[in-house]
């Protein structure tokens, strides 16, 4: 598809005509926002108390959005049940997410069948950024449970008359490559590190496109996939809070086109919460439009990105998230420094033999230290020295080493990770609470 399909989806769901223009799109978003806020105030005990006396009709311009308070991850975890706007009989899915770094209550997200169907609608249209009806798609995502990510995607593709199948968890890359060859799959969807491992065992040119989703994908990783297997890679941005679907790249590869019929996106300063100028990187704030079970008003995702509302080269006018860094769970280091998994991804995935890794923060000889376990492709097993050198180029780690508060720890090759190693990459912090 070109990105007119995302525009067409947005226009249909907002009741607009094509071609879209930004002014009519934003006006329709504001109308949907007013309805969503009214629904939340009327049906949610927590929103009713928090927004007591707030008049949804007063939301007339985009600047008025800042009059609504920001919603934090901690508030969602603590008050989640109070945000629900429907009876339990209308809830089709509940997803539980453990709050990062917290021993408190997990976040629980509630969805009605219509909420889930809106995601299926987006998946159906969004996938045509990288496929046609002639493609056959293999989905390397959880798919066995009803309404899991893979299940929703398989159902969406079926609506578009595209054949797809799911595999989870993927473990035997050689066997998977043979299946892709034997059954003529031409497009693959999965986590970036899984698709990297798969790329090295696929015949060059066999697979036409790959969609990288569910984790941060550094450009170095994408470039390696494309070079080794001859496919074109695309990014998807989405979180459980956005309803799994969020935005997808078009062939211009200039940001992820957002499903603005269902999501209103802001970028704010992570420290102050104030809006930042368009094009500047900040924290992604999401307001769900039209969601029935649990509307989220100005939810702070913790993800870093920039927003571009200028027309895309593909002709689409839906806003695009660019410079996506994902949820930055930065670990503080002694001396006032910090490091996040994305910082490590940017340097480690430039190493040709590396397929995946796990990083752990601990204490060695009174200093912070990062140890690394890694997977390597055949013939590249001895990456220990290269990984040590790469870690020393991470700006924050380099500064911490110069301040003599940090050193690189043990680096060890492993044969495999547990099947549970399928979540977003993060740094495991085993130092305790001495900081």
Image: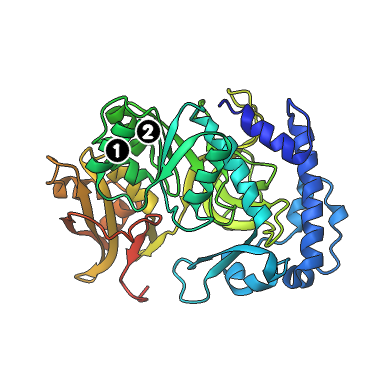
Residue at the spot of label 1: 179
In percent of width and height, residue 239 lies at: 53, 53
Along the line of sight, which residue is nearer the eye, 336 or 257?
257
Left-right relation of 302 to 135: right
What number is the disc on residue 185? 2
In percent of width and height, residue 66 lies at: 73, 54
For disc 2, the neighbor class at 10 Å (few under 14, some 14 to 19, many from 20) is many
The residue depicted at 57 percent of the width and 45 percent of the height is: 246
Number of numbered callouts drawn: 2
For disc 1, the neighbor class at 10 Å (few under 14, some 14 to 19, many from 20) is few
In percent of width and height, residue 86 lies at: 73, 66
The residue depicted at 63 percent of the width and 23 percent of the height is: 315
Along the line of sight, which residue is nearer the eye, 85 or 21?
85
Left-right relation of 369 to 152: left
Give the image quarter of residue 338.
bottom left
Give the image quarter of residue 174.
top left
In percent of width and height, residue 356 lies at: 27, 49
**Residue 293 visible in image:** yes
Q: In the rendered structure, are the residues bearing label 2 and label 1 in contact, judged by CB atoms less than 8 Å apart? A: yes
Along the line of sight, which residue is nearer the eye, 296 or 11?
11
Along the line of sight, which residue is nearer the eye, 182 or 5?
182
Query: Which element carries disc 2, helix, strand or loop?
Result: loop
The earlier-in-sequence mark between 2 and 1 is: 1
Q: CA distance from mark 2 to mark 1?
A: 8 Å
């Amino acid at each position: 598809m070109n990105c007119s399909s995302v525009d067409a989806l947005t226009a249909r769901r907002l009741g607009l005509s094509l071609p879209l223009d930004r002014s009519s799109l934003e006006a329709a978003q504001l109308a949907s926002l007013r309805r969503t806020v009214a629904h939340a105030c009327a049906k949610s005990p927590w929103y009713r108390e928090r927004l007591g006396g707030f008049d949804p009709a007063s939301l007339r311009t985009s600047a008025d959005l800042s009059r609504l308070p920001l919603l934090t991850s901690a508030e969602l975890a603590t008050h989640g049940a109070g945000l629900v706007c429907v009876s339990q009989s209308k809830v089709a899915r509940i997803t539980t997410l453990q709050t990062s770094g917290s021993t408190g209550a997990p976040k629980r997200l509630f969805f009605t069948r219509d909420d889930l169907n809106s995601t299926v609608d987006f998946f159906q249209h969004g996938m045509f950024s990288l496929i046609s009806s002639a493609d056959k798609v293999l989905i390397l995502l959880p798919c066995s449970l009803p309404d899991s990510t893979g299940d929703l995607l398989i159902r969406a593709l079926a609506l578009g008359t595209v054949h797809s199948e799911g595999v989870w968890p993927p473990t035997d890359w050689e066997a998977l490559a043979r299946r892709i060859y034997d059954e003529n799959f031409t497009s693959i969807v999965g986590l970036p590190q899984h698709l990297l491992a798969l790329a090295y065992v696929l015949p060059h040119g066999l697979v036409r496109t790959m969609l990288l989703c569910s984790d941060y994908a550094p450009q170095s990783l994408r470039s390696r996939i494309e070079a080794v297997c001859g496919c074109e890679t695309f990014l998807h941005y989405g979180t459980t809070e956005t309803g799994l679907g969020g935005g997808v790249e078009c062939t211009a590869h200039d940001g992820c086109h957002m499903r603005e019929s269902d999501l209103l996106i802001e970028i704010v300063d992570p420290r102050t919460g104030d809006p930042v100028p368009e094009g500047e990187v900040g924290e992604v704030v999401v307001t769900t439009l039209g969601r029935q079970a649990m509307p989220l008003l100005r939810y702070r995702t913790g993800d870093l990105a920039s927003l571009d509302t200028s027309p895309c080269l593909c002709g689409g006018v839906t806003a695009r998230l660019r410079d996506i860094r994902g949820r930055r769970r930065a670990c503080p280091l002694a001396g006032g420094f910090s490091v996040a998994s994305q910082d490590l991804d940017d340097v480690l995935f430039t190493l040709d033999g590396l397929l995946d890794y796990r990083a752990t923060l601990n204490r060695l000889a009174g200093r912070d230290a990062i140890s690394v376990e890694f997977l390597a492709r055949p013939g590249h097993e001895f990456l220990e020295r290269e990984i040590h050198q790469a870690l020393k180029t991470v700006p924050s780690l380099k500064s911490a080493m110069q301040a003599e508060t940090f050193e690189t720890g043990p680096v060890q090759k492993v044969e495999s990770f547990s099947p549970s190693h399928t979540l977003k990459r993060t740094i495991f912090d085993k130092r305790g609470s001495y900081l």
